[in-house]
Image (cartoon, rainbow, N blue to C red):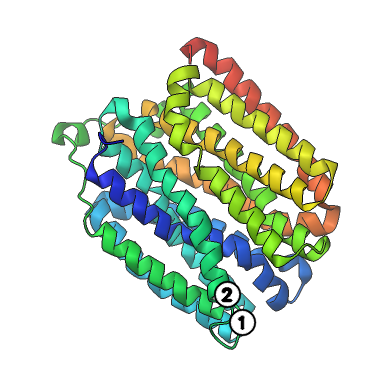
């Protein structure tokens, strides 16, 4: 890890602080929504809103970074994130469900910015360190897994309305993250590479590696989000498990999403990207089997850990492959398309999770994911022998 430049370490710390927005909203968004929503099947709308917001804001955030550079963009998005956290607190304080949903939607700017951290890290290192840089930045998510829910609980009774104070504390985390981002320096990329001829997207789309990367990340994110978004509602409201147990399961899940990042670069060197992504799909299948077998806390806990591990293998594998599909001059537009597809699909998954679990139940929600996983398995299997990965 000593070979990684300062940029990567700053981005890792900032990721830990700013990504806490995700674990906070996932943990309490559905719980707050259940109290404020006019209809019970809208309970997870605040959680889905952050995903929809991410999908919608990816193009403007990417354009901003292309226009003024990553450093200035990160600073602007950090300031905006602090304001949105305070707005979210206010919406809870006045018990306005729709303003709360708008606020979590605006957190999409925060998440879109954080998702660019991995690309900024990879641009800061040589080609042989790409998996290591991407993995290291995602390690920051381990701290975010604890920071978000702990801040939510710490601020739960800070004000007269439950959880309103949680987002004031979240604004404080954003301010600290912004401090570290001030030290970030735009990666130096050769001018001739930046100004090189750009291929049309239609030509880039013809590359199999592009589709393997984008489909692996999309299916990985959509399946993970669909199950994760429904878990607090299923655990706490439907099965009557305590809030502390629900928090523990969500925290464990988010830790499992990022902890494997410590060894994924090593795994890629040992078995290759495609085998690691297939291992991620196997983790997803075992996750569904265990969750389907029972509704005890241990079932939720083990299955959500496997869900996190599966996501990590698929997402880091896809992130490592994507740069193989574009030249430096094409990076912003390809990254924008990639993340828009990923988070657009995740938005659909999150939006439908609340409705689906109330309409069809937990077990059906689990089984509906299997066809997508099978499809991805055959995509990877068909491509991998040709690349010997």
148 or 68: nearer the viewer: 148
**Res. 177 image quadrant:** bottom left
85 or 158: nearer the viewer: 158
* Residue 58 spot, x, y in % from top left: 43, 52
Q: Where residue 147 is drawn, which disc sits there?
A: none
Residue at screen point 48% across, 30% down: 317
* Residue 74 spot, x, y in % from top left: 30, 58
Please give left or right for residue 75 compared with residue 388 in the image.
Answer: left
Q: Alpha-carbon distance for marks 1 and 2? A: 6 Å
Q: Residues within 10 Å of mark 1 (few under 14, many from 20)?
A: some
Assign the N terminus to one quadrant of the image. top left
Residue at screen point 51% across, 83% down: 90
> Do residues under tags 1 and 2 come within 8 Å of each other at their CB atoms?
yes
Please give left or right for residue 211 compared with residue 289 in the image.
Answer: left
Q: Mark 1 = which residue?
A: 96
Q: 374 above or below 118?
A: above
Secondary element under disc 2, as helix, strand or loop, is helix
- Confirm whether residue 222 shows in the render: yes
Q: Residues within 10 Å of mark 2 (few under 14, many from 20)?
A: many
Please give left or right for residue 129 compared with residue 115 in the image.
Answer: left
296 or 191: nearer the viewer: 296
* Residue 379 spot, x, y in % from top left: 60, 23
Secondary element under disc 1, as helix, strand or loop, is loop
Residue at screen point 28% across, 59% down: 180
Q: Mark 2 = which residue?
A: 100
Q: Residue furthest left?
A: 191
33 or 312: nearer the viewer: 312
- Confirm whether residue 334 shows in the render: no
* Residue 127 spot, x, y in % from top left: 29, 27
How many circles with numbers are drawn on the protein? 2
Residue at screen point 51% across, 62% down: 148
């Amino acid at each position: 890890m000593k070979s990684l430049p300062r940029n990567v370490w700053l981005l890792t710390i900032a990721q830990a602080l700013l990504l806490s927005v995700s674990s906070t909203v996932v943990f309490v968004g559905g719980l707050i929504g259940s109290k404020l929503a006019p209809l019970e099947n809208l309970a997870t709308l605040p959680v889905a809103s952050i995903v929809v917001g991410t999908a919608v804001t990816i193009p403007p955030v990417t354009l901003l970074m292309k226009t003024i550079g990553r450093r200035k963009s990160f600073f602007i998005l950090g300031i905006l994130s602090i304001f949105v956290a305070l707005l979210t607190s206010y919406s809870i304080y006045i018990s306005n469900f729709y303003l709360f949903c708008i606020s979590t939607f605006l957190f999409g700017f925060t998440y879109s910015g954080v998702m660019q951290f991995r690309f900024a890290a990879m641009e800061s290192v040589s080609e042989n360190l790409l998996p290591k840089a991407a993995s290291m930045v995602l390690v920051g998510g381990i701290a975010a897994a604890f920071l978000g829910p702990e801040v939510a609980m710490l601020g739960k009774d800070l004000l007269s309305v439950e959880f309103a104070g949680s987002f004031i504390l979240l604004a404080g985390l954003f301010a600290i993250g912004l401090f570290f981002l001030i030290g970030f320096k735009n990666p130096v990329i050769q001018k001739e590479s930046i100004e090189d001829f750009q291929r049309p997207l239609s030509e880039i789309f013809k590359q199999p590696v592009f589709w393997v990367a984008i489909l692996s990340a999309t299916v990985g994110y959509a399946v993970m989000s669909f199950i994760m978004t429904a878990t607090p509602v299923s655990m706490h409201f439907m099965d009557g498990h305590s809030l502390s147990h629900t928090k523990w399961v969500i925290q464990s899940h988010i830790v499992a999403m990022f902890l494997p990042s410590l060894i994924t670069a090593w795994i890629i060197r040992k078995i290759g990207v495609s085998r690691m992504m297939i291992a991620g799909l196997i983790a997803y299948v075992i996750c569904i089997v265990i969750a389907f077998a029972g509704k005890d806390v241990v079932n939720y806990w083990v299955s959500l850990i496997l869900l996190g591990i599966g996501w990590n293998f698929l997402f880091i594998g896809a992130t490592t492959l994507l740069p193989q599909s574009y030249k430096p001059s094409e990076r912003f537009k390809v990254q924008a398309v990639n993340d828009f597809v990923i988070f657009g699909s995740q938005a659909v998954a999150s939006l439908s999770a609340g409705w689906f679990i109330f309409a069809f139940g937990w077990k059906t929600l689990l089984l509906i994911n299997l066809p997508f996983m099978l499809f991805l398995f055959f995509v990877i299997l068909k491509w991998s022998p040709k690349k010997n990965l």
